[in-house]
Image: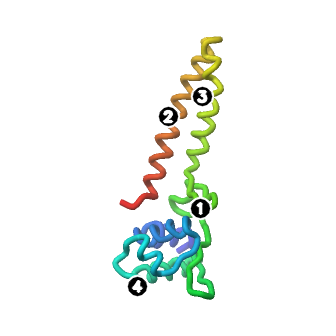
Amino acid sequence: MRMEEALEKDVAGEYNTFRIYLLMLRIRRGSVRDIARALDLSSPWLAKHHLEKLVGFGLLSTNEVGEYEVIPKRFGVLKLFSLIGKWTVPHTFFLAIIFLVMTLGFLPRIADEPLFTLAFIASVIGLAFTLHLTLRMYRLLLPK
């Protein structure tokens, strides 16, 4: 099995493993107890099991004091997101910004010409659609 397939099956397809990786993308570094507490896991041993699995896939490393540090990688659903610092941002968010700028740019000109009114309406529809998609993308990352 290729590494990409293994990541999608054994990390993105495993609820707790994926939740732990998403948390580590946000906090960057943490101990077994930090992770268990943050995700309200039943025991630190459960957190350690998933953390060690992530280490095995090269998604985490351990430092000299026993903390785990994230190694950011995009796989599975994470391919649809950009990792910017501690933020995991859906690609559709950038499209929403473009449509917002277009909408604001056409707004003062809609009284000048009917063509600007049409362009304004199209940009508002594009903005609404990309915001809807962006919210749906964020829901993919939220715990169920």
Q: Which residue in the protein does label 2 denote?
A: 128
Q: Is residue 143 left or right of residue 120?
A: left
- Counting residues from the start of the chain, the first of labels 4 and 1 encountered is 4
Which of the labelled discs sits on residue 86, or is there none?
A: 1
Q: Quadrant of residue 40?
A: bottom left
Q: Is residue 80 above or below residue 129?
A: below
Q: Is mark 4 on a helix, strand or loop?
A: helix
Mark 3 — residue?
103
What colour scheme does the image use?
rainbow
Q: Mark 4 points at which residue?
A: 45
Label 4 or label 2, whichever comes before in sequence order:
4
47 or 118, which is in the foreground?
47
What's the amino acid at mark 4?
Answer: Trp
Mark pair 4, 3: CA separation: 52 Å
Looking at the picture, how far across and down is residue 143, in whole percent? Answer: 39, 61
Residue 24: give x, y in percent of width and height.
53, 70
In the image: residue 43, left or right of residue 88: left
| Front position in the image: 113 or 12 | 113
> Is 2 placed above or below 74 here?
below
Q: Answer whether labels 4 and 3 touch (C-beta < 8 Å).
A: no
Q: Earlier in the sequence, mark 2 or mark 1?
A: 1
Spatial separation of the CA atoms under disc 4 and disc 1? 26 Å
Mark 1 vs 3: CB contact within 8 A: no
Q: Which residue is drawn at 63% across and 58% down?
A: 84
